[in-house]
């Protein structure tokens, strides 16, 4: 086994994406998998839901058990602590994990300056074997966070960041040592993934192992949405297919799974380029109103510093993960006005961004208009924690399984979702 060095991503430190929900996912939060992967592993997250044209020869992909065995000596030698997150990704073409660096506030120990090439793997994407495994370790003494990548039998130690101000609370616990391997989890899922597997000879596969207390799960995703990491272009429109499964990690039993057709590929991933900045938008539902058949869901915002409306769009899906069509913003709902002027659309929904005084800063419509109604000569707004997002809809969304998610529209990675 060789142990090359590699530079750790800048997301190992302040402004990392927020902690994911407890292990397991709702069918209504398909992008939840990407959120999990994004924890200190944005270098992996940019490839989630990706599929490009095949190129190169498939690598000798390995299961999680093989990857963990390969990484064990490195984790021990550098005292990396306990394993908190395991992510395996296979794509039917080769991509490069770029040379990116830490930051001044949170320098990286053992970082180095080489790119890593991840080979193609398309022959057996549902086997539980992955072309690359991304492993996140945490230590409490000293407080530190480390990332290791395993490609075949080669282990890349990306680096370690230390200090309470540089390590985020993942709201996770160490993964159990008796968790079944990805190969066992995939075997359990494949009987229910039959229609997807028969329809797609090639696909991207993502395997995510997390734990929260006594609950440990494997989340599995297969998709044919198309993404080219060299250009940051996502394609596939609304005709993408997706299979998701949730497996109990200690037994291999299937908890939940679903085949989803005609998903919005661009909304799932957005245009994310390798090595681009990563932002998150944490949202909390803080109220609702029903005024003359106009329904309002009010969300408090906690954005990563620097996040702009130019960086993301908004998607609302129902309990079956079907996108809710957007409606046109009412004519009186304009910059500087009041949300009381934002009346229900003829059908669907739109969103209103308000400032600390409650006045309208901008609006968003999923009917194709996107962000609009900015101040004069302004085309975007940088978000702050003093702002709120109001979802204006024709029908009551509260309590009916609807989920609002954000997706990238520019050269940055943006994540965030909340149940309405």
Image: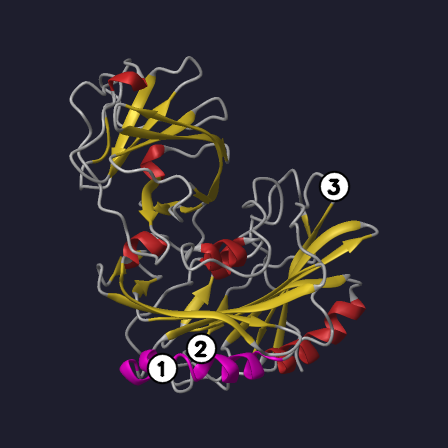
Label 1 sits on residue? 56
154 or 63, nearer to the observer? 63
**Local SS, label 2:** loop
In percent of the image, x 29 and y 59: which residue is there? 265
Q: Is residue 191 magenta?
A: yes
Q: Residues within 10 Å of mark 3 (few under 14, many from 20)?
A: some
- Residue 333 appears in the figure: yes
Tell whether label 2 touches label 1 (CB within 8 Å).
Answer: yes
Label 2 sits on residue? 119
In percent of the image, x 62 and y 45: which residue is there? 13
Label 3 sits on residue? 164
Residue 157 at x, y = what percent?
65, 65
Residue 45 at x, y = what percent?
47, 58
**Comes first in the chain, label 2 or label 3:** 2
Q: State the CA–CA distance, disc 1 to disc 2.
A: 7 Å
**Comes first in the chain, label 1 or label 2:** 1
Q: Is residue 107 magenta?
A: no
Q: Tell which tag, 2 or 3, sits nearer the viewer.
A: 3
From this viewpoint, which residue is outermost toward the right? 141
């Amino acid at each position: 086994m060789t142990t090359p060095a590699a530079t750790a991503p800048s997301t190992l430190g302040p402004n990392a994406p927020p902690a994911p929900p407890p292990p397991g996912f709702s069918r209504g939060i398909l992008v939840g998998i990407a959120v999990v992967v994004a924890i200190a592993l944005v270098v992996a997250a940019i490839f989630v839901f990706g599929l490009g044209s095949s190129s190169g020869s498939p690598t000798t992909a390995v299961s999680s058990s093989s990857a963990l065995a390969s990484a064990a000596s490195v984790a021990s030698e550098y005292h990396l602590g306990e394993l908190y997150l395991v992510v395996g990704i296979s794509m039917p073409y080769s991509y490069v994990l770029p040379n990116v660096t830490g930051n001044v506030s949170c320098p990286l120990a053992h970082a180095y300056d080489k790119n890593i090439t991840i080979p193609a793997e398309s022959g057996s994407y549902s086997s539980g074997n992955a072309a690359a495994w991304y492993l996140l370790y945490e230590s409490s003494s000293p407080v530190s966070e480390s990332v290791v990548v395993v490609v075949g039998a080669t282990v890349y130690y990306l680096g370690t960041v230390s200090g309470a101000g540089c390590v985020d609370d993942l709201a996770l616990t160490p993964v159990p040592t008796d968790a079944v391997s990805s190969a066992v989890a995939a075997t359990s899922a494949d009987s229910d993934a039959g229609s997807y597997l028969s329809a797609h000879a090639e696909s991207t596969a993502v395997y995510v192992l997390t734990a929260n207390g006594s609950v440990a799960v494997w989340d599995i995703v297969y998709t044919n949405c198309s993404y080219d990491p060299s250009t940051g272009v996502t394609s596939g429109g609304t005709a993408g297919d997706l299979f998701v499964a949730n497996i109990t990690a200690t037994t291999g039993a299937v908890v939940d799974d679903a085949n989803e057709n005609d998903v919005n590929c661009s909304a799932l991933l957005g245009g994310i380029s390798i090595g681009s900045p990563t932002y998150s938008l944490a949202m909390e539902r803080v109220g609702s109103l029903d005024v003359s058949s106009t329904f309002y869901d009010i969300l408090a915002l906690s954005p990563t510093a620097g996040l702009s409306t130019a960086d993301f769009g908004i998607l609302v899906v129902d309990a079956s993960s079907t996108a809710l069509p957007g409606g046109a913003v009412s004519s009186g709902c304009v910059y500087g006005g009041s949300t009381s002027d934002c009346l229900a659309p003829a059908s669907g929904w739109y969103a209103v961004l308000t400032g600390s005084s409650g006045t309208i800063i901008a609006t968003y419509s999923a009917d194709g208009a996107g962000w609009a109604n900015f101040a004069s000569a302004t085309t975007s707004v940088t978000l702050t924690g003093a702002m709120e997002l109001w979802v204006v809809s024709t029908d009551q969304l509260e309590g009916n399984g609807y989920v609002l998610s954000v997706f990238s529209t520019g050269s940055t990675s943006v994540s965030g979702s909340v149940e309405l």
